[in-house]
Structures are given as structure tokens and as C-alpha cells.
Amino acid sequence: MLQNKVALVTGASRGIGREIAITLAGQGATVIVNYQGSKEKAEDVVSFIKENGGCAESFGCDVSNFELCAEMIGQIIEKYGRLDVLVNNAGITRDGLLMKMSEEDFSKVIDVNLKGAFNTIRHASRYFLKQRSGSIINISSVSGVSGNAGQANYSAAKAGIIGLTKSVAKELGSRGITVNAIAPGFIETDMTDAMPEKAKEAVKSQITLGRIGTPADIAGVAAFLASDAASYITGQVISVDGGMVF
Ligand code: NAD
């Protein structure tokens, strides 16, 4: 259980982040629901958590902005006096084959998906070190583990998340701080909704468990990694992909 813990979940207004926020709050954490543009949706998540007896608030911040991340984390510490769980979930795609990929589409995906995680970790770590505790959970992807045609930018960012996770785990481990990554497979959210049915069926045929994943499949693992039950797990990449890659 996560009573008395304060958790920040980035990109939590919808999809996997929303489900992680709701799950952490359901286990007793006070959750900061970070969003970039969709304040209304983030407020819906907060209302849902409160209606179910939990504690939450929304916080708008573009995670690709270093200074704004410093402000967000500073304000959380000022208000709650602590931060225990950081879930770097915010992410975007700008898919396309390498030969047609613009520099902007490459940079934007790296800025949000990889530098965004660096930004929050960089600022939160100060407090984790003072507390001598903290759980960092970074959302990578099966694309970061195996690569994926049409996603050179996204796969590079998600593979970068794995390197970031392992390096920071080694730097912070002696202070009781755990850093792990989750590599989801194909999960039903707005991000994957745009894919044509035929392409979805093709992906499904590669999944050992024979079904597309749900945000709840990821949220349960995130809640475990945030809990004291996972306090001896660090530097790991946990694939939650229905057996897509092994
Ligand atoms: P989604 O598009 O539904 O949600 C992404 C969230 O991130 C949105 O709420 C969006 O507003 C937010 N976001 C985007 N840019 C942001 C920024 N600069 N600052 C703050 N928030 C920002 O996607 P999802 O499927 O829920 O994905 C969540 C995470 O899981 C992402 O990191 C994604 O790469 C990863 N992932 C998803 C799948 C999948 O199949 N859906 C698979 C592997 C990994």
C-alpha cells in the first residue's frame, strides 16, 4: 500500500498515465496529476480520484521544459514537504520512416520522451537524496527494447530511457532510491487508437497472450514498483507486453 506517499505522474490526463494515477491514489498515495494541455481531462482524473476517497491535484507543466519541471517539483515539495514516487509517463509519437523523418520530429520526440524524464529526475533527485528514499518509474517501450520500423525517434528515446534508468539507479542506489523502467507492449490508448484495424491485428498476432494490453496491465506493475514490496528491485526493465518479446 502507498499510504503517506506523495506521487507525481507525468502525462496523467489520459491513457496509461491516468490509470497509474488512479491506481496509486487507490492504494493511498496523494497523487499529482501532471498534464500539458488538457487541464479539463486532468481535472476529471482528480475528481474521479476524490470521488473514490483519494487525494489528488492537477499540475500543468510541459515536461520538456527544464525550468518548468524545477518549478513543479519545487511547488510539490513546498506544499507536501516530500515526494516519494516519480512516474515518468508523458510521451508522444511522431512516426515515420527514417528517410522521411524531419529533424523537428526527431528532436521533439527526444525532448518530451527522454529529456522530459531527465528533467523531472534531475530536480526530484535532490529531494530523494535528502529523504534517503524514493521510487522512480520510467515508462519505456517494447520499441526501445527491440526497435520498430517507422519509429526511429521514438525507439531511440525509449532505449535512452533504459540507459537513463540504469545509470541513475547506479548513482542513487546507495541512498535507498530505486529506479526502474516498464516497457509496455501494445496497449489500447489514444496513442494506439489511430492505427488501422489490420495493423492492430498484425501486432496482436505477435502477442503470446493473444490480446492487446490495457492501461490497467501497466498501472498494476507501476503500483508494485512504487510500493515497499519492491524496495530491493532497481535498475530493471520490466516488460509488460503479453509476451511480445522474449
Ligand atoms: P497517450 O497519448 O494517451 O498519453 C500520453 C500523455 O502524455 C498525454 O496525457 C499527453 O498530454 C501527455 N504529454 C505529452 N507531451 C507532454 C509534455 N510535454 N508534458 C507533459 N505531458 C505530456 O499515450 P499512452 O498510450 O497513455 O502512453 C503513455 C506512455 O506509455 C508514453 O510514454 C508512451 O510512449 C508509453 N507507451 C505506450 C504504449 C502503448 O501501446 N500505448 C506502448 C509502449 C509505451
Image (cartoon, rainbow, N blue to C red):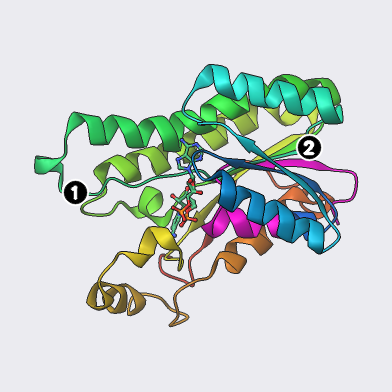
Question: What quarter of the picture does the C terminus occupy?
Answer: bottom left
Mark 1, residue position: 96
| Image position of 241 (left or right of 222) | left
Q: Residue at x 61, y 40 (%)?
A: 34
Say whether residue 223 is visible.
Answer: no
Residue 145: x percent and y percent? 40, 51
Residue 84, disc: 2
Outermost bottom residue: 210
Q: Quadrant of residue 72?
A: top right
Mark 2 beta carbon near ligand 1 (under 8 Å): no
Q: Residue extending furthest right? A: 4
- Identify which amino acid the numbered label 1 is placed on: Gly
Q: Position of residue 182 (x, y in %)?
A: 55, 52
Identify the residue at horizontal 15%, vertical 42% (top origin).
98
Q: For the residue marked with disc 2, what is the amino acid? A: Asp
Asked if the stretch drawn in magenta spans residue 21, the answer is: yes
Look at 10% across and 42% down and name the residue there: 100
Position of residue 96 relative to residue 176, above or below, is: below
Q: Which mark is residue 119?
A: none
> Residue at the spot x=53%, y=33% of the render?
117
Q: Is residue 111 above or below residue 240?
A: above
* Quarter of the picture holding the N terminus: bottom right
Q: Which residues are magenta?
A: 1-22
Quadrant in which residue 157 is drawn: top left
Magenta stretch contains residue 60: no
